[in-house]
């Protein structure tokens, strides 16, 4: 059995947050103050995030999905408008479009970077198209120059890519608006939470006006999408450590790439004009389910990076590249909290598993 060749059995989850004593103290300070709802910490988090990404305004909200919903409203999406998005994503953008009254148009992806691309978007643009949602999947930026040339407003979905760079500039600063998610295992974590970022003062004012309903007239639809101060305190603490998180992710990814490049599998591409933060390290292999099963037998949890592509639950959409990637793709554990011992175990597992498969 191949597992007998691995010296010490371990249990390595697919992902886990990195929370240190500084994070705990930041949250405890807010809890002890008694001011735990939306307040000064939220405002500070909004300002700090906007400054980090390189835009003027930030609006903190309760989740990445609520951020997408408000971003669509902020960009002017109304009932019946079409919003283009890739199929190879979680349901959040699709559901946000429905919440905004829009018609989601699901498109195929590029086989190299696994992102939405201009050539597929262009085929689906119509007079009803109001926006394109551009997720930078697994931490690697989409080809933004080509997408921007289409002239359709872009909402960057940076839920997996906070800190990634395109042409030397941070993602999240290219589109009309961008969003982030701070779910427990994202680039920085607040448990739940999200943010809309923009340079557009009109969009900012519109989103800020409808984020909450308290002490406001009933003149339009409003929501209860607020973030709490103790979440924001955790976000501020985590954001300070983001450069170190990214550096560690890139170090681990480099080790994986060096080892896995020896085998007959697809590994993440390295690009001269864009820098991934390696939110996920996604390989593509034949019989990916077998690889996943055998890894689990040895305590390593690998996951399908997207649970179910959107078009598989819809009619009228053809996405052959997504179909191919879905069958082959597997996400290997990669996060800043991996220890040196865990990394060595993973490298050892790669050697045994893929060398055996190559043979």
Image (cartoon, grey):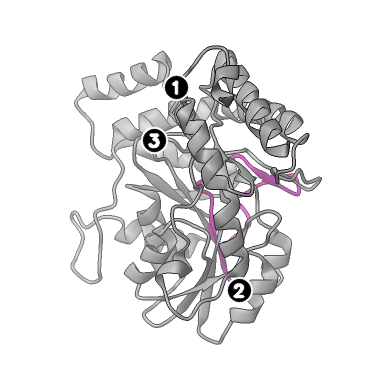
Give the residue number, with chain letter if any, for mark 1: 11
Query: Is 222 situated left or right of 147 in this image?
Result: left
Residue 302 or 155: which is nearer the viewer? 302
Count of residue discs = 3
Write the start and end of the magenta stretch as one range: 152-177
- Asked which secondary structure carries label 3, the reply is loop
Q: Outermost residue, bottom direction?
A: 127
Residue 250 or 50: which is nearer the viewer? 250
Mark nearest the camera among 2 and 1 is 1
Within 10 angstroms of label 3, few (less than 14), some, or many (20 or more) residues?
some
Q: Please tell me which of labels 1 and 3 falls first in the chain.
A: 1
Mark 2 and mark 1 residues within 8 Å of each other at the beta carbon? no
Does 334 sit above or below residue 28?
below
Q: Is residue 287 magenta?
A: no
Mark identifier at residue 228: none
Give the residue number, with chain letter if any, for mark 2: 152
Q: Please tell me which of labels 2 and 1 falls first in the chain.
A: 1
Q: CA distance from mark 2 to mark 3?
A: 32 Å
Indicate the position of residue 218 as horizontal and vertical percent values: 18, 68
Within 10 angstroms of label 2, few (less than 14), some, or many (20 or more) residues?
some
Give the residue number, with chain letter if any, for mark 3: 184
Within 10 angstroms of label 1, few (less than 14), some, or many (20 or more) residues?
few
Can residue 187 be seen here? The reply is no
């Amino acid at each position: 059995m191949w597992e007998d060749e691995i010296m010490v059995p371990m249990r390595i989850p697919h992902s886990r947050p990195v929370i240190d004593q500084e994070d705990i103290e930041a949250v405890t300070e807010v809890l002890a103050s008694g001011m735990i709802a939306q307040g000064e910490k939220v405002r500070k988090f909004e300002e700090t995030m906007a400054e980090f990404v390189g835009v003027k305004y930030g609006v903190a909200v309760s989740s990445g999905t609520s951020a997408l919903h408000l971003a669509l409203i902020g960009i002017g999406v109304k009932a019946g408008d079409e919003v283009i998005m890739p199929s190879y994503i979680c349901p959040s953008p699709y559901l946000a479009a429905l919440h905004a009254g829009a018609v989601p148009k699901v498109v195929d992806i590029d086989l190299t970077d696994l992102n939405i691309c201009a050539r597929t978007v262009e085929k689906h643009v119509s007079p009803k198209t109001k926006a394109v949602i551009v997720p930078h999947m697994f931490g690697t930026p989409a080809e933004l120059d080509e997408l921007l040339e289409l002239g359709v407003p872009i909402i960057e979905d940076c839920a997996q890519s906070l800190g990634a760079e395109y042409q030397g500039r941070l993602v999240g600063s290219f589109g009309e608006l961008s969003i982030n998610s701070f779910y427990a295992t994202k680039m920085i974590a607040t448990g739940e939470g999200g943010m809309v970022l923009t340079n557009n003062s009109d969009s900012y004012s519109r989103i800020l006006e409808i984020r909450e309903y308290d002490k406001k007239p009933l003149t339009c639809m409003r929501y209860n999408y607020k973030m709490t101060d103790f979440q924001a305190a955790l976000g501020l603490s985590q954001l300070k450590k983001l450069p170190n998180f990214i550096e560690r992710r890139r170090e681990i990814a480099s080790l994986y790439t060096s080892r896995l490049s020896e085998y007959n599998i697809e590994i993440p591409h390295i690009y001269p004009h864009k820098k991934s933060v390696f939110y996920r390290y996604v390989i593509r292999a034949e019989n990916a389910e077998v690889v996943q099963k055998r890894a689990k037998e040895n305590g390593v949890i690998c996951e399908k990076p997207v649970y179910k592509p959107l078009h598989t639950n819809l009619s009228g959409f053809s996405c052959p590249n997504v179909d191919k990637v879905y069958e082959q793709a597997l996400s290997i554990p990669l996060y800043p909290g991996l220890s040196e011992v865990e990394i060595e175990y993973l490298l050892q597992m790669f050697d045994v598993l893929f060398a055996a498969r190559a043979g």
